[in-house]
Amino acid sequence: MTVPYLRIRNVTKRFGQFTALDDVSIDIQRGEFVCFLGPSGCGKTTLLRAISGLDIQTHGVVEQDGRDISALPPAQRDFGIVFQSYALFQNLTVAGNIAYGLENRKQPKAEIQKRVKELLELIGLPDSGHKYPGQLSGGQQQRVALARALAVSPGLLLLDEPLSALDAKVRGHLRDEIKTLQRRLGITTIMITHDQEEAISMADRIVVMRDGRIEQIGTPLEIYHQPASLFVAEFIGAMNLVPAMPLRHGEIQLGTARLACATDGYAPGTAVRAAVRPEDIVCTGKVNGHANSFQAEVRDMEFMGPFFWLSLGGGALGEQRLRAQLPSQRARELGLQANEAMHLHIPAEHIRLFPQSAGHG
Amino acid sequence: MVELALAAPRVRPRLGRDDWLMGGGLVALALYLAVTLLLPLALMLAKSAQDQHGVFIGLANFEAYFSNPALSGAIGNSVGVAALSTLIVIGLAFGYAYALHRSCIPFKGLFRLVAMLPLLAPSLLPAIALVYLFGNQGALKGWLFGASIYGPIGIIIGSVFWTFPHALIIISTALATADARLYEASESLGASRWRTFTVITLSGARYGLISAIFVVFTLIITDFGVPKVIGGQFNMLATDIYKQVVGQQNFQMGAVVSLLLLLPALVAFFVERWAQRRQISALSSRAVPYQPKPRRARDGILLALVCLVAAMILGILGMAAFASLAKLWPYDLTLSLRHYDFSSTDGGSWASYGNSIRLALYTAVFGSLLVFIGAYLVEKSRIAQPLRTATHLLALIPMAVPGMVLGLAYIFFFNAPGNPLNFLYGSMALLVMATIAHFYTVSHLTALTALKQLDPEVESVSAALKTPFYRTFWRVTTPLCLPAILDIAIYFFINAMTTVSAVVFLYSPDTTLASVAVLNMDDAGDTAPAAAMAMLIVCTSAAVRLLHAGLSRWLHQRTQGWRRR
């Protein structure tokens, strides 16, 4: 593997007695788009502010492009930043905002104008240079903030919840734009978000954080399908977590059903929690054509348009409840009715086990 | 893992050029405030425990003070007069503010304007006008049924006049922000009007009222102008400081009285800060603004009250104006400008008016510069948190320090023979420093409020763009805060024009001031020229106010493009 562009080693940040970041280490490759994801207070903003030098960590090392920048003030680092609040200069025009960082570099006026024009086109606002930020919509303002950050061609782009202040439709649109722009420019990017959908759809890799620590680093697919901890399993997407017990190597009991799955590290007889995604529960109707199947009743159905939410119980599940997601088209094929017994199949590779109690510790 | 983190060396953030510059600025500001505020006050504290030769004598001065009823009687006088005046002012101001915000009386703009007029005048002016109205040759002397205006009655009326706008501003703020939903709820629950008034209106305004009570009480008990002119033989704390220092050259006893005067001001300061915080947090962003509906009886009564108060304000101002123009009160009432020719009086001159203008200009320019840059450093610098807190606290001190006390402290500090800053004594520069220090707090808080309304990440973005902070300060922060800066400048200007208390100890023959001239001419019996000088101050303040209003409007129109969509 090549030398990482950004190397974060054992970074810790304390505010008095409170530890906001606890021994965090991450490597980020050149050109990568990484999301820091976690609930509020998980330390993602603190980590971003340490990387930018706006609030320097108490311990640990940050290296950018082979240079130790751990103790440098922001002005001596190489990054562009975009905030949730846009932080545009209200009294300067859009063009003035974008040119702000360039003017400081003693470039010829014509060159600055050319670059501003280029960036205005890049963000799709070619005719708005003379307007003031207050005359633009939220999404447009955020694009100007992005252009302002990119104007000086920084090596690293930091996005601090850039989409959180926007309404849903604009957010989806801008999400795609930012992603496309990032791929095109190939700029190493870190984005903070508490929105898992945003992280999954945009990032090359996701860093899931909780209580100042890293829970898991991985691609969106890894994070979604192979959550490393109960926290990640619960935090990302919808997840069934039901009590279960390993019977022997490679088999668990769930309710009265016996299901095959990986049981590495769990001795037979220990209480565990089995994690299953609702969309991984396959409903085969009256026929049972699979191994790893069991019978249960559809207790409740909720129509969501493209799919149904099924609430499963009884049968082999007994008192346990499972939520399953069934495509509408499949439900039509099966002629599914509430309170009917069904055969259900869960592929072994989609069942993951977690310790019963230690999960929230 | 914990041990590992502890074992790793602590990161020592390297300071950039911005950090050095801002840190240096903060240190300079803290030093400046220490020299112009903290050290003088500390020295005064020390003086109160020394005898005439500078020997430490503990609390002996205080013992002497309290065992002398002629001196300590002033405490009761001051507290009593201030309490009664406060009661009257708050009652009137509440009624006035209620009429402006919760009724449908006509001419609200005009009434608001009239109520603010006393702010343009030194507190000496109402006292002089009262002499003309109710004094020995007063126009309305009979109205007092033989009682003398010289004494508590005069002090109370005069104090009510000049503190009225202060109370009105605070109570107006409290009454202006009403949530209509509360009133609808109360009405739909069948509560009587009186109950709605006490439960919703009064309790909603209670912090504003508390705040106003303490502010007004402090203003009155520390005021020097009114009791000096019309107090007669009635001793008050503020006039006693003057008598002890200027009359008897007893600086130590002056220090003792100053410390006593500091007490109510300190209490008021903390109560006021507490109330302010509550008032803000009581507001909800979802509130629906209350729109008063016409109600005949209520509007009629309130209109009568507002007219009465406005008439009194205009009457007192008008009396002063007339007195300054009447040839020889009360014998020859033909109008002339002879009293505006100050050459025949020895208390004041056009030169002192010129000095006042200079003082006001310097204070406005240097004061707003210092305050705004200082507030910026306190609010926006990223380093030296303890220093920022300390500087902020220093900036809050002046609110709790009466002008007389500050002036006396300045004598002690800047007139001390060993002080290298001694050369400033009696100079215009010292008058400017004293006036800036005297009115620092309100200006500082105004600047802070304006700065807090800006996006806190503007500085972060600027740093990321490798732009030095002073460039962003100049190109972004200052233009955005220009209205607030103008407000600060006008506040400094008008207060510098009208103040007497701090500067009365500090002027020299070369730097006599208009406001002090009013005092001295009145003292010498030249009451008409004193009224003329007071009217000059009023007219100047009014003109500057108008200029400010015009400038603000022009600024607002010019910057319409980027102000709020």
Image (spheres, rainbow, N blue to C red):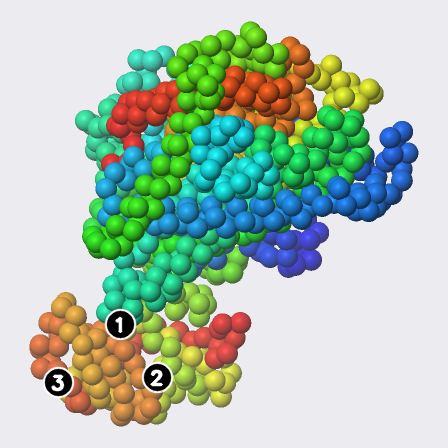
In the rendering, which numbered label is found on residue A136?
none
Location of mark 2 (residue): A259
Circle 1 SS class: loop
Residue A12: x %, y % from top left: 59, 51
The chain identifier of the residue carrying mark 2 reads A
Q: Viewer-nearest of labels 2 and 3? A: 3
Residue B409: x %, y % from top left: 72, 30
Spatial CA span between label 2 and label 3:
25 Å
Q: Residues within 10 Å of mark 2 (few under 14, many from 20)?
A: many
The chain identifier of the residue carrying mark 1 reads B
Location of mark 1 (residue): B189
Circle 3 SS class: loop
Q: Are marks 1 and 2 in contact (CB under 8 Å)?
A: no
Residue B179 appears in the figure: yes
Q: Residues within 10 Å of mark 1 (few under 14, many from 20)?
A: few
Among the 4 quarters of the image, the one containing residue B422:
top right
